[in-house]
Image (cartoon, rainbow, N blue to C red):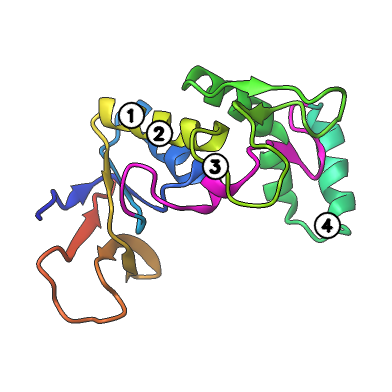
């Protein structure tokens, strides 16, 4: 199988974070590919197994940024990178709204402060992997559909290694990186610099 090898953005991993980043880049007019090692429409990944609860350190992700900064500081004993804490605290609420606009549906679980944004339909709280058709699974499939409508691609093969030039990531080698023997589906993608 052959693929176009020139993309503005190559995202490694087709979970919630990867598909969100890819869709946002595609919304900005960039040519995007997502490399996902899982196979099939409902490929296995941590996002599908998750409970689909969006929170920050067991607090409502749409709390005021100043409160979320304190929550992050307390949860990490002050060791979190201040710039990352600031970015997370100031964008988490927008991220929840953005996911809703992308088709994610949420429910609230009573007045439990950290369960105000649970992807619907929720998973039952029982042992086992009852994830098919649950909120995270439904949301991931919607994000793949959205990406494809925007001209992006989900390529189901693993990333083998990052390509670097002068200390910067300039591409991704995809395929069976463990074997290192060339295979017909193995290819390289160089990112275009802007």
How far across and how far down the image is residue 32, in percent?
29, 41
How far across and how far down the image is residue 96, in percent?
62, 27
- Which numbered disc, 3 or 1, marks the residue that appears first in the sequence? 3
Magenta span has 19?
no
Magenta span dominant secondary structure: loop
Q: Could you tell me how far apart the alpha carbons at marks 2 and 4 are, in whole angstroms?
A: 33 Å
Which image quadrant for residue 119?
top right
Is residue 43 among what the camera can see?
A: yes
In this view, the residue farthest toward the top is 101
Q: Residues within 10 Å of mark 3 (few under 14, many from 20)?
A: many
Secondary structure type for disc 1? helix
Is residue 28 among what the camera can see?
A: no
- Which numbered disc, 4 or 3, marks the residue that appears first in the sequence? 4
Question: What residue span does the magenta drawing correspond to?
Answer: 39-62
Q: State which mark lies toward you, 2 or 4.
A: 2
Which image quadrant for residue 66?
top right
Which image quadrant for residue 76?
bottom right
- Is residue 122 rendered to the left or right of residue 62? left
Q: Could you tell me how far apart the alpha carbons at marks 3 and 2 are, in whole angstroms?
A: 13 Å
Point out the image quarter for the C terminus.
top left
> What residue does disc 2 label?
141
Secondary structure type for disc 2? helix
Magenta span has 49?
yes
Evaluate if marks 1 and 2 touch, with contact meaning CB atoms under 8 Å apart.
yes
Q: State which mark lies toward you, 4 or 3.
A: 3
Residue at 63% in and 22% down: 106
> What residue does disc 1 label?
145
> What residue does disc 3 label?
131
- Which numbered disc, 4 or 1, marks the residue that appears first in the sequence? 4
């Amino acid at each position: 199988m052959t693929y176009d090898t020139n993309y503005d953005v190559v995202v490694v991993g087709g979970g919630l974070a990867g598909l969100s980043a890819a869709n946002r880049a595609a919304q900005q007019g960039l040519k995007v590919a997502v490399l996902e090692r899982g196979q099939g429409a409902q490929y296995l990944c941590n996002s599908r197994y998750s409970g689909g609860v969006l929170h920050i350190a067991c607090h409502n992700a749409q709390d005021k940024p100043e409160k979320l900064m304190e929550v992050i500081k307390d949860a990490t004993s002050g060791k979190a990178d201040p710039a990352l804490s600031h970015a997370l605290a100031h964008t988490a609420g927008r991220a929840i709204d953005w996911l809703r606009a992308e088709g994610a549906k949420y429910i609230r679980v009573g007045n439990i402060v950290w369960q105000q944004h649970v992807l619907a339909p929720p998973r039952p709280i029982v042992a086992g992997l009852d994830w098919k058709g649950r909120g995270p699974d439904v949301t991931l499939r919607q994000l793949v559909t959205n990406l494809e409508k925007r001209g992006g691609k989900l390529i189901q093969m693993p990333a083998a290694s990052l390509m670097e030039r002068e200390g910067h990531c300039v591409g991704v080698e995809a395929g069976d990186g463990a074997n290192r023997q060339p295979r017909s589906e193995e290819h390289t993608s160089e990112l275009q610099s802007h």
